[in-house]
Image (spheres, rainbow, N blue to C red):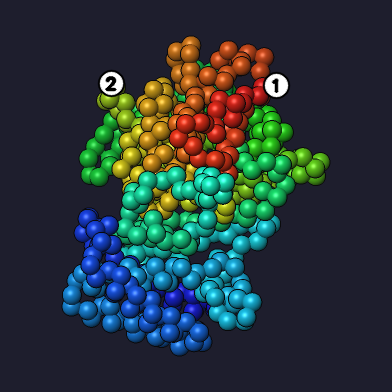
Amino acid sequence: MASIQSTQKYMNIMAAALQIVTKIPQTFNEIFASQDYEEISTFVTTTLDAYWNDDNYSLLHNIDDFLQTIHEEKDSNRQQIMAISFCLWLDFRITYTRDENNIAGKRAYFSLASLVSISKDDYAVVDSLNTNYNKTGIWINPKFPIATPHIIRNEELFEKNISNRDIFEGINGSLKHCSYVSYDNKNIIKNIIISDTFLTEKDDCSFSIGFSPISDRKDLLQLEDQPIERNGIKYNGELVKPLNHAEELLERLKNDWNLAGDMNVDIFFTPELLGTSISEKNDGEYNSFLWECSNLRLVSGKNVPLLTILPSYWSNNYNRSTIVSLDGQIIGHQEKHIPFIDKKAHKMEALAEIQEWSTILIHIPNVHRIAIVICAEFLSDQDRIQKFLCGSLGATLLIVPSYSRGEQDFINTLPVLKCYGTTIIWGNCCGAVASNEKAIGGCGIAGTTQTITFGSKCCCNFSCQNIKACVFKVKIPLDFELSKTTESFSKDNVTHNIQ
């Protein structure tokens, strides 16, 4: 296994080559039709193949020298083809396992395990795989295989990608083991990698998301005017004060979380804004509330969600969702950056400006790459979601907690990311909606034509009266036959359980 220094050198070399790739014009895919592409690509791979069985020091020295040859190339078209071929060659040889050799004992892969160490009982947190992002303007992230449907042709099964062919940014769609984005001192990606060993305990090939709307009360939020300044402009702001019925909300959160465990959901999430100082209290690296809840269930041999996304907590002009592992350990926080704007009242959510935009990307190998987008960001920043989260980082599952009166906007947007192969799960608070009929949330499942609202499966008549706990469960198939005429996902994949 390569050392940390060697792996970082390997990725730094790749980042320097990607610096050339990012300068290719918008008509990016035309370069693959270049008359010289095959000849130049073959030259690059043949040259690099000759270095492959050298020791790490010699290998890295030689490929770094070859990169200088690419930089010195005067013909821009030839240089671009060389840089693309160079990056694809480096990516193809990456592995995240410790074993680099084949059965004959010869090098088959270049291991990044010293940078990204995954164990079945823990998780890994990784920022950029390269350290030269300030110099190159390139931030490289790990990428793992995800669940892929199949087609049947001549009685044989073939994996079939469900994303559009040329929809990804740059060569991100061709890279198998890493992704990259431009770095500008603002966009930070925190990659959280969680083992997929939990799949071995499942009877079926599925992954389930649980959501609880928590409450139907209309008077949960206490709002107060607060002038704010963003980007040097003064606005009419509105802050969120401590919630009404906080103890009731906490009890309901506990009951809903326990019900989600009984329903064997893998990820449990809740609406925006309903977090309290108690649900957010921590003891070092652990969320005190969920540590206690998890410990009680685990010692009793009961199931606990793999991940819990707590209701976002609004405090000191920040609104963020805390992500907690099955044993109560805090593994990250997703901040909300774009405020809700009430055009009729001429006000906006009084969020403080955050100069550094940190994005949590959760990798579960052979399952999904998961991102969290909070409420207004989902509706107001589709360009960033499509080009950055999906088109560059390759997010395949978007979880969208909200507290919103305008459900139709979310319903309309549920299918928009299917072209990226991205599934959307959205959840709303019943108390936020004035009408008797509510969507409550919904899902747009990639690889299918299905868009389903939770309200269509509601079995409580949209009322929390005499309800102790309430959870919607979306069962997402990880392996299914992709068909143009029949559906592998139906309303039966969405269930509503109450106590």
Of marks 1 and 2, the one in the foreground: 1
Instruction: Determine which quarter of the picture holds residue 58.
Output: bottom left
Q: Residues within 10 Å of mark 1 (few under 14, many from 20)?
A: few
Q: Picture quarter containing residue 335?
A: top left
Q: Quadrant of residue 98?
A: bottom right
Location of residue 49 in the rendering, given as x and y in whole percent from the top left corner? 43, 80
- Which label sits on residue 344? 2
- Amino acid type, mark 1: Gln
Please say whether residue 6 is visible from this viewpoint. yes
Mark carried by residue 225: none
> Up-down: is 398 above or below 344?
below
State the mark number for residue 499.
1
Residue at left offset 48%, top offset 17%: 438
499 left or right of 376 in image: right
Q: Is residue 291 above or below residue 472?
A: below
In the picture, measured across the screen, residue 72 lies left or right of residue 14, that is: left
At a point 53% along the width and 24% down the height, the residue shown is 454
Q: Residue at x 32, y 72 (%)?
A: 41
Asked if 169 appears above or below 437 in the picture, the reply is: below
- Secondary structure under tag 2 reads loop
Quadrant of the snapshot with the C terminus: top right
- Closer to us: 21 or 307: 21
Please state the horizontal and vertical placement of residue 274, each as a whole percent of the image.
53, 31
Label 1 element class: loop
Amino acid, disc 2: Lys
Q: Residues within 10 Å of mark 2 (few under 14, many from 20)?
A: few
Q: Residue furthest right?
A: 300
Q: Foreground: 10 or 313?
A: 10
